[in-house]
Amino acid sequence: MNQPADEFSTALAFTLKWEGGFVDSPSDAGGPTNFGITQKVYDGYRHRNHLPLQSVRQISINEVNDIYMNDYWLTGDCDKMQSPLPIAHFDTCVNFGPFQVARFLQQSLGVEVDGQIGPITLKALANSDPKSVAISICDLRIAFRYERVAKDPTQKVFLEGWLNRDSALKNLVISIK
């Protein structure tokens, strides 16, 4: 697809702004997290690369970039999308996981929602307006947040931050020419 060379860098910078450094909130089901990468994801990365396991507190910026490129950007098929969609899709992949981001993408494209980005989704994607799809994904994120809090009121503590992130992402998408 047609992407600016620095689109991954733009997407990663946005995501890292919101993910920050090390956190281990008892209210967060993800457990210990650094730069938005959970201990479980980091353990998988270290294992795949034949490295000894260590605390996610010790993750290097090179490891962060590698994980985000391979486990989110490429796994999420962001490299197959036109600007500004990959930025919204990537951050959603990081924040919601590859299955849910695929569902948001499919809902936005009006195709069957199965959580797998296959030939039908890719064909619809090729015939879509990337900015409109990105904006739709942002709107679906917001609706999902409210549904999540309605189902689990303990998550309300995160709602304002989530909505701020979603609004900032939507504004970034809108601003890209």
Image (tube, rainbow, N blue to C red):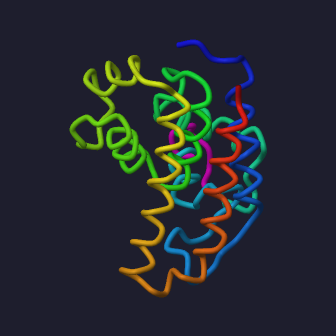
User: Which percent across, then down, holds residue 87?
Assistant: 62, 36
Magenta segment includes 169: no
Position of residue 52 in the picture relative to residue 103 (left or right):
right
User: Which percent across, then down, holds residue 54?
Assistant: 66, 58
Q: Quadrant of residue 172?
A: top right
User: Which percent across, then down, holds residue 24?
Assistant: 65, 75
Determine the residue positioned at 56% across, 33% down: 73
**In the rendered view of the protein, which quadrant contains the C terminus?**
top right
Vertical side of 31 occupied by 74: above or below: above
Determine the residue positioned at 48% across, 56% down: 141
Vertical side of 24 occupied by 154: above or below: below
Determine the residue positioned at 42% across, 46% down: 101
Q: How many marks?
A: 0
Asked whether the viewer can see residue 133, the reply is: yes
Asked whether the viewer can see residue 55, the reply is: no
- The residue segment tinted magenta is 46-53
Position of residue 131 in the picture relative to residue 59 (left or right):
left
Vertical side of 170 occupied by 111: above or below: above
Mainly helix, strand or loop, the magenta region? loop
Nearer to the camera, 40 or 160: 160
Q: Quadrant of residue 167?
A: bottom right
Nearer to the camera, 127 or 94: 127
Determine the residue positioned at 68% across, 30% down: 8
Vertical side of 91 occupied by 49: above or below: above
Among all residues in the image, which is located at the extreme bottom?
154
User: Which percent across, then down, holds residue 58?
Assistant: 75, 57
